[in-house]
Amino acid sequence: MHINGASVPARSGATFPTTDPSTGRHIADVPRGDSVDVDHAVQAAADAAIEWQFSDAITRAGLLRRLGALVSENADELARIESIDSGHYLGKARELVDAMPLWLEYWAGAADKVGGRTIAVPGNKISFTLLEPLGVTAHIIPWNYPLLILVRSVAPALALGNTCVVKPAEDTSLSALKFAELVQEAGFPDGVFNVVTGYGAEAGAALAAHPEVRGITFTGSTETGREIARLGGQHIAQVNLELGGKSPLVVFPDAPLEDAVEVAVQGFCSRAGQVCVAGSRLFLHEDIADQFLEMLVARLRTAVIGDPFDDNTQMGPLASQKHFDRVREYIEIGKQEATLLYGGGQPEHAASAGFFVEPTVFVDVPKDARIAREEIFGPVTAVMRWSSVEDLIATINDSDYGLFAVLWCQDITSALDTAKRLQVGSVMINDWFGELPMTPHGGHKQSGTGREEGLEAVHGYTQVKHIGINLDRSPAKASNWAGAPL
């Protein structure tokens, strides 16, 4: 692990294995941290917090830029670690790593530019606010995009003067440990950035419940998010949650079908469907549904699924045996609820020991079916036809989730009207989701609270302090004492 600037084992000496999801082979043993290690890391972060909080913002910005340069210099190794540990195919992993300096540069640029405001108040007074860091922030990272989500949350936290303790997912801990080496090499003070590896119930829960942790950011399932919120609420920590999704991808009758088909494939097959914003509900207007489905199946037949290190691969495996079993169970449920149009099995050419699932398309899906309402988190989509915009919007909004939506529609008036009425955090029109550091990301309802990225993320890592100054210096001369206790 990485605590207080040093590489350390778990205090207990315990470890757990991590495996390559494309082969099922053992990669390495990872320290199995628990509450003792979490306390060690949090205390290191708390000890570093005061000096780091009052460090010059330009100094923090310089360190973030140096870290971004180191990420670029080590991009090949980081991408290979991400591929072998999480199942990302290498080309996509490299694209993601190449993009990560954007987050570090964005928040380096923001470090000395975000701040409070002056307030007009009655009398000869000055009133203003300061934005101050929370202190120690906890970053509980999921297994689907281990390094990207780590970077997108620690970059603003560090830029704004917080110290960080990261708990990566147990299935995908390796890239966080390599990133910690780069943080140290960049010159960040000891204790500012810490990584504790271990299981959620042992290390993650202890981190969320630690009374010295003032802010928590978590990306993952709604069920786990509720528990994180409960644990953080016991000591009134500020909690930011990006949780599950059941995102709709809507195709209007005037849509360019070839483009919309490609986005539909990206929507539920990217990262083998292991994406919070995955387009796992596909709404096709009845006028174009048959043609669209023919084109969709033809496109899926060309998808290359297999070894993440093969340059031709377009979709890798699911991240673990446990998750593979879960997705396969949902496919069997879907066969009972709807009509299987395509997929449903394992690719014949994929590695027999790996956790591979074919892209799977169900049609004639009732809107109350489990595969239409529950997050599967695999390459599975539920197709529903529509004709009435009113019914379409009602069906989309009749969901526990509200993270993301995609609309393919040439009539911009119809597209904007629909977008405004959807109960989701983001809507893309005639495009697919490309995560960027300058645009806010988060959900409504059980898809979460707060926002990652964009200047909106400042609120997740700061607290507001109000300061008032009476320039008259004599309260007795004040004409209006309405706010006083007498």
Image: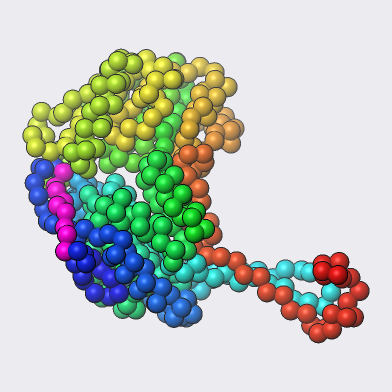
Residue sitting at x 28%, y 26%: 330
Where is residue 126 drawn, in percent x and y? 74, 76
Against 347, is 105 above or below?
A: below
**Number of dots carrying numbers:** 0
Q: Is residue 453 left or right of residue 196?
A: right
Where is residue 377 drawn, in percent x and y? 32, 36
Q: Is residue 431 left or right of residue 419?
A: left
Please identify the quarter of the rendering in which residue 262 is found: top left
Against 336, is 75 above or below?
A: below
Frontmost residue, 388 versus 397:
397
Q: Quadrant of the C terminus?
A: bottom right
Q: Is residue 313 left or right of residue 109?
A: left
Residue 166 seen from this side: yes
Query: Magenta includes 14?
Result: yes
Please identify the quarter of the rendering in which residue 372 is found: top left
Residue 95 seen from this side: no
Residue sitting at x 47%, y 63%: 214
Q: Quadrant of the N terminus?
A: bottom left
Residue sitting at x 25%, y 32%: 326
Where is residue 350 drawn, in percent x and y? 11, 34
Please identify the quarter of the rendering in which residue 65 is found: bottom left
Where is residue 393 drawn, in percent x and y? 54, 26
The part of the chain drawn in magenta is 13-21
Residue sitting at x 42%, y 46%: 227
Frontmost residue, 454 versus 274:
274
Frontmost residue, 51 versus 146:
51
Colouring chosen for the image of the structure:
rainbow
Query: Magenta includes 426?
Result: no
